[in-house]
Image: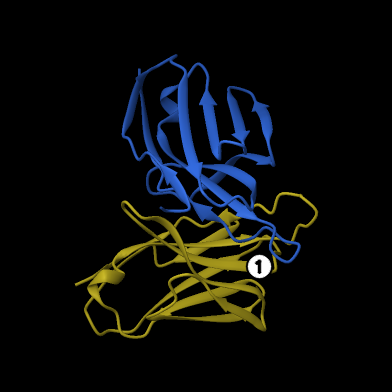
Chain colours: A yellow, B blue
Amino acid sequence: DADVTQTPRNRITKTGKRIMLECSQTKGHDRMYWYRQDPGLGLRLIYYSFDVKDINKGEISDGYSVSRQAQAKFSLSLESAIPNQTALYFCATSDLRTGGAQETQYFGPGTRLLVL
Amino acid sequence: QKEVEQDPGPLSVPEGAIVSLNCTYSNSAFQYFMWYRQYSRKGPELLMYTYSSGNKEDGRFTAQVDKSSKYISLFIRDSQPSDSATYLCAMSADSGGSNYKLTFGKGTLLTVNP
């Protein structure tokens, strides 16, 4: 089984609808992230969480909210979806590393979201 | 100027060619340099990691970092069709003792033709 799973894998919704994307991990990592990927813009960080009680905004958090239900689960919500939120969304996890050690981020397979 | 610049390609090469992928950056605080590979309809996966300047080799892949020029490269020798993917450079600075905050390039789409 995959270490980082995302549901749904594909979603089509309409403008104004609320939608939730879910991420689960079995890697035992404390840190979890949500990114969106757009053609020509690369990967951009939406929110990140260092543990269940520590949630932080990334560079493009407007229009999104998150919930860290448990160490292994991190959900992303679009309260009122709009067409420019059409993108590929990735969840990632990592474990704290310091002193020059690599803090590798492991990505899920992505959710392809289309907002009409 | 964006923090990280990467030519999106696409880049198409014949099997067996040497591939050179590059990124430039403007933030002199970056110390951690990574290359991720992303196959179509998959999430990115870490391919190479380098801390500070220098070279690192792993099989057919070599990563180079030149901090004086703010330039990083990934070389793929004897390229194979299975290397066809989008390659993303990523960088981070030391942030409170951790290096979690990645800044990504836009990615270069590589196709290796049999």
Front position in the image: B29 or B100: B29
- Looking at the rendered structure, the kind of residue marked 1 is Arg
Residue at screen point 36% across, 85% down: A79
Residue A35 location (% of width, % of height): 47, 64
Q: Is residue B82 above or below residue A111?
A: above
Q: Is residue B36 left or right of residue B14?
A: right
Residue A103 location (% of width, % of height): 69, 54
Q: Which chain's residue wears label 1?
A: A
Q: Residue furthest left?
A: A116
Residue at screen point 55% across, 67% down: A33
Residue at screen point 44% across, 14% down: B16
Q: Is residue B88 left or right of residue B67?
A: left
Density class for disc 1 (Cα within 10 Å; few <14, some 14-19, many ≥20) is many
Which residue matches tag 1?
A31
Residue B79 location (% of width, % of height): 47, 20
Residue at screen point 38% across, 44% down: B40
Quadrant in the rendering for residue B59: top right
Q: Residue furthest right?
A: A99
Residue B86 location (% of width, % of height): 41, 40
Quadrant in the rendering for residue B47: top right
Q: Is residue A28 above or below residue A103?
A: below
Front position in the image: A87 or B20: B20
**Quadrant of image for the C terminus of chain B:** top left
The answer to whether residue A3 is seen in the rendering is yes
